Image (cartoon, coloured by chain):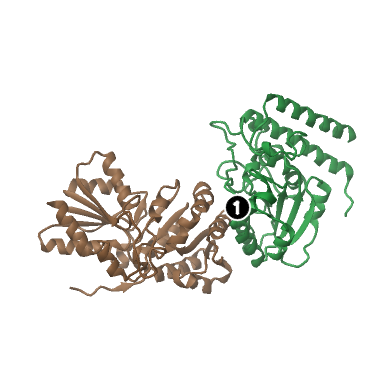
Amino acid sequence: MTIKQMANPRDAYGETLVSLGERYQNIVVLDADLSKSTKTILFAKKFPDRFFEMGIAEANMISTAAGLASCGKTAFASTFAVFATGRVYDQIRMDVAYSNTNVKIFATHGGISVGKDGASHQMIEDIALMRVLPNMTVLAPSDASETRRLVELMATTPGPMYARIGRANAPVLYTSDEVEDIAIGKGIITREGSDVSIIACGTMVDQAIDAAARLSKRGVSARVVDMHTIKPLDERLVLKCVKDTKAMVTVEEHSIIGGLGGAVSEVLAEHQSKTRFQRIGVQDMFCESGEPDELFEKYKLSAKHIAKTITTLLK
Amino acid sequence: MKHHDEAFIRQLDLMAVKIRKHIIEMLYRAKSGHPGGSLSAVEAIVTLYFHHMRHNPQDPNDPNRDRFILSKGHAAPTLYAALAESGYFDVEELLHLRQINSMLQGHPVCTHIPGVEASTGSLGHGLSFANGVALAGKLDKKDYRVYVMVGDGETDEGQIWEAAAAASHYKLDNLTAFLDRNFLQIDGNTEDVLRLESIQERWRAFGWHVLEIDGHDIEAIIDALLMDSEQKNQPKMIILNTVKGKGVSFMENNIDFHGVPPNEMEYKLAMKELTLVERALEASL
């Protein structure tokens, strides 16, 4: 087994903000007392005039970002996923989505791999909450390279956007050449396969790739799709997978309700798809404190469990 | 107090009556909406749009314009009437408020109503939004001013106090807020629902320069707008002592008219009262 090169998507976010800040004068960044964790501190140090520390007051942060955006700024607002969405749903709904402002909500610490902080901090509903809002684009980058690319695209594409990454280091999945082709709304086939399609997002893309390797040892050929954009969903690619492979699973570090699995289910149902299908994610429950690997294992999100679920599905 | 040209003040008073007539007409036709809080907000909005603010209805997106954000979005009829009378859109448009396929939504929407700066209606957001606009002004070294109106009941919302803290922390002296202190919210008197007093002390404690005036006295509003802050770099709060339902006798201080439009009889009576005041003002000019 080759040793994976690791990088933290949060660092990628902070560094990309700095390079965007150099290129674009109209980029401003807001944070709610978590700049050291979200890495917006890198931008704050370089461009103190364009960084706004809002304190532990997320509602005010989102609406203030919208006010800045109404004056021609591209406003990135960052905090943990749990505070960036659920806590401020009404502010996002009114001042970002309904007002169609150029606010980019970039959340870190999404999903259960936040780990030891426990269920209070493990955001597993954010994709569902953001996906239901009109005008909102929803992104979940899988590694540092993809994060870098998608943050650049967020800055240069107008409109309300939400992106979430995890807390931990993640294996680097893309070379710098490969990221050039990444576009909002276009899923990526990261591994070809003919028996089953694994459609994953965020931290789960790496687990899906490992699951595919496990499956190939058992003679099952699995395609892996990195669906970094949950909305607008790449329906064409979902339907291509239906045609090309016999079964499909979605994998996400999110509730199985309303997220990537929900979005793909909607496409399958409306196209009268008869493909065997299962959503893999957090079942309708809150999780608990623990190491990320322990949590993936216990809540059946590890590569081993993904492979097992697929084996059962294919029976 | 500075001396103002009396005839000019009377012109503004006349515009206030005109706006009140629009409000009653709009709500009667819409058969829904919020008369009480729309009528209490009239003089401050008239003073801003017809005297104090630098704005150009022909160029609603002029980057150097002064901005007004109506945080208490349910007073939309007042804002719409002021925008129409300023020339942002046809006065005739007012008659379609809240109706299907019409531009004028029940609460303000910034995406498709010329002159509306922020989409409001869910209370507590507008001051934060105004902070963002004021921060952008500082960042861009522009000299525009930002005005925002919040309802007194609206300050029950926690977000208002997050924004109050941020405005003074960021020394937003380009920001002026009005508090429409009409003492009434849907469930009753503000002091019975969730005590606000001492509202002056609260805002002072948050670092604001606080003034309290008669919110229906246009001369006093002009003076308050022109007054320099006690300290440099402070945001300014003008508490407007107002009467909910002001200008229509049976709506004044009557909570039943918070969110209920006039029926036909009430409509006729209200228009009659307002027309009498309008004629008297016209005669005095």
Nearer-the-camera pick, B225 or A59? A59
Nearer-the-camera pick, B97 or B136? B97
User: Badge 1 is on which residue?
Assistant: B124
Q: Percent x, y for residue A67? A: 58, 55
Helix, strand or loop status at disc 1? loop
Q: Percent x, y for residue A64? A: 57, 58
**Chain A, which colour?**
brown
* Left or right: residue A293 compared with residue A194: right
- Residue at x-position 74% and y-position 59%: B200
Nearer-the-camera pick, B257 or B121? B257
Quarter of the view holding residue B206: bottom right
**Chain B, which colour?**
green
- Does the image show residue A171? no
Q: Amino acid at mark 1?
A: Gly
- Residue at x-position 60% and y-position 52%: B124
Q: Quadrant of the N terminus of chain A?
A: bottom left
Quarter of the view holding residue B39: top right
Quarter of the view holding residue B81: top right
The answer for which chain carries disc 1 is: B
- Residue at x-position 75% and y-position 38%: B252
Q: Characterize the local packing of mark 1: few (<14), some (14-19) or many (20 or more) Cα atoms within 10 angstroms.
A: many
